[in-house]
Each structure stands twice: as structure tokens, then as C-alpha cells.
Amino acid sequence: MKYRKKPVVIEAVQFLDNIEEIEKFVGQKLSRTDSETDELIIPTLEGKHIASRGDFIIKGVKGEFYPCKPDIFEMTYEAFTTLNDICDNHGWGKPLPGTGIMDCNDKRESY
């Protein structure tokens, strides 16, 4: 039998030179495997996993975190932009709940 992943939206951060950002993302201080490497120890539901530079740290549907290799991430996920993201990026107001109409400083635009 074949299966297809359900479309779910996840949050992720790529591990580059941003250890503080990743620690804020996962909500705790992370350890390195040793001082010579660019590897982080990520606590997961299955135990500790190693994230190498370039890996994505994913927040799963149950709030869990786990590393994912960049090639697998690119094959599995694509960028997702919400209407709120668009508003934030353009300095607009927020969409009116359930309407799809923008509240842009009393100017209404439908999208």
C-alpha cells in the first residue's frame, strides 16, 4: 500500500552560524558534540540526535524538534507564506478574521 504525507505546516530554522537563534527556537540551551565540530545535540522524542551545519531543525506537529538533512528538507517541504506574513512584510494591518479583507489603516482591499 502507498501513502502520502498529509499537508501540514511546520516551522524550521537552518543551522548555519545561528546557534542562539536555534536555541531560542527550541527553547533551551543546546550542547555541541565537542568544541572542534559544528554539530549540535538536538533532544528529540526518540533521544538525542546530531545536527550538522546546514541541517534544518524542524518543529513537528506535536511541538517536538528534530534535525533534517538539507536535501531531504528540500524534497519534502516548500516555503509557506500566510496572509499575516504578507501584511507584516508590507507594513499593512492584519486581515479581518474570516473575511480575507485587509484592514489597512481604514483602507479595505480584498485579496
Image: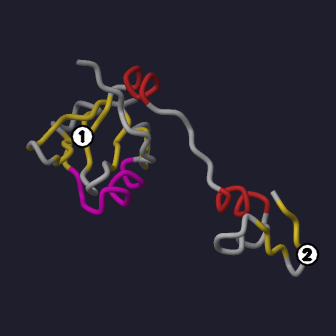
Disc on res. 12: none
Single out the mark in the foreground, 1 or 2: 2
- The earlier-in-sequence mark between 1 and 2 is 1
101 with respect to 33 (left or right): right
Labels 1 and 2 touching (C-beta < 8 A): no
Q: Nearer the viewer, residue 33 or 63?
A: 63
Q: Position of residue 36 (x, y in %)?
A: 22, 31
Label 2 CA crowd tier, 10 Å (few <14, some 14–19, many 20+): few
The outermost residue toward the bottom is 106
Q: Which residue range is magenta in the image?
A: 19-30
Q: Residue at x 24, y 52 (%)?
A: 64
Q: Residue at x 38, y 36 (%)?
A: 56
Magenta-drawn stretch, dominant element (helix, strand or loop)? helix
Q: Position of residue 77 (x, y in %)?
A: 46, 32
Residue type at the position of mark 2: Lys
Q: Does residue 95 lie above or below 28 as drawn?
A: below
On the image, numbered disc 1 is attached to which residue? 40
On the image, numbered disc 2 is attached to which residue? 107
User: Which quadrant holds residue 14?
Assistant: top left
**Could you tell me which quadrant the C terminus lies in?**
bottom right
87 with respect to 38 (left or right): right
The outermost residue toward the left is 47
Q: Residue at x 43, y 37 (%)?
A: 16
Q: CA distance from mark 1 to mark 2?
A: 47 Å
Q: Position of residue 70 (x, y in %)?
A: 40, 25
